[in-house]
Image: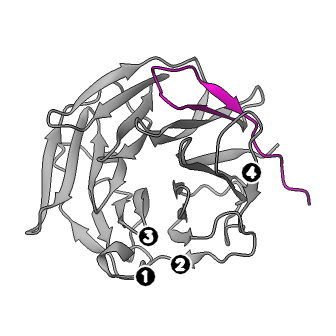
Amino acid sequence: MSNHIHIAGSPARGIVLLSDDGAVRSLGQVGPTPVWLECSQVAGFVRGEAAFSCLLGGAHYTTVAHGTAIRYLSSLGQPQARWKDVASPPAGTGIAGLAGGPQEGYLLLGADGRSLYRLAGMADGRSAGSGWKPCAAPPFGDKATLIAGDWQHGMLALGDGAAGKLVNDGTGDTWTALPAPPLAIDMVTGNFEDGFLAYGEGQLCMLSTGAQPSWSRLSMPSFDVRALSGNPAHGLAAVLADSSGDGTLVAYALRPGREAWSLALAPQARRR
């Protein structure tokens, strides 16, 4: 079995998996007998390398970051499709977090937890290879640790007992304070259109993004979660560890906190 380290997308709109050998596989529809499609291997992905890595996107575009290299793929399920390079981060900037995609634009959190940069997307009439622009730093006393969302609709930043929303109101960057999460958060996924889901301390919680944003805890089985992706509107998918500690299982809930979780058969290791 492959050791899946990242997951992107949602059960309702399609899931993408990244393994620790750089293999990418996509699933258009969850169900009892899922059909996983092989995607083009991520170039330059080194198994076991101690570097930042993440997977973003879903049914149409998938982005992989590894170290300081960022690439996206627009043809899922086609092993011969080519990955396209996104502009490198500013010189000397390590990556602690990445959010967004080539269409709506990217947001990058520097390794210092204070530096933020944005990259306009194709929806703004600019290519994903345009340069990064600095954004206002998070208004936290401490550094930010996680980001989610995108530049077009707004970015969520989480710090130690703090949360904030960054938007561009046409005149500049504007931060709005949000309620602090009820848990120490390890993972967060979602956007300001569909809401956010976060995981920490072995529990799941949701951030509603209406006129009065608020956090609520959601019920969840006792899983060993390695990665998760989705949102309250389109469901949540997670990579789970097996008895060996590898991420070989995929579970999903179409309505997290309100419906039972289901296991999907994860793709087998690629034959060599």
**Residue 204 position (above or below residue 101):** above
Q: Which is in the foreground here, disc 3 or disc 4?
A: 4
Residue 208 position by quadrant: top left
Proximity of marks 1 and 3: CB atoms separated by less than 8 Å: no
Q: Which mark is residue 85?
A: 2
Q: In the image, which residues are magenta? A: 250-272
Q: Label 1 belongs to which residue?
A: 129
Whole-angstrom CA distance, mark 3 to mark 4, is: 23 Å
| 247 versus 167 height, above or below | above
- N-terminal of the two: label 1 or label 3? 3
Callout 2 secondary element: strand
Compare residues 136 and 58 and report the one nearer the observer: 58
Residue 154 sits above or below residue 222 on the image = below
* Mark carried by residue 36: 4
Seen at 44% across and 28% down, the residue is 200
- Given the image, on which type of amino acid does mark 3 rest? Pro
Please tell me whether mark 3 sits on a helix, a strand or a loop. Answer: loop
Q: Main secondary structure of the magenta part?
A: loop
CB under 8 Å between discs 3 and 4: no
Residue of label 3: 102
Q: Amino acid at mark 4?
A: Trp
Q: Residue at x 67, y 67 (%)?
A: 42
Q: Amino acid at mark 1?
A: Gly
Q: Secondary structure at mark 4?
A: strand
Name which residue lies at 21% across and 44% down.
Answer: 164
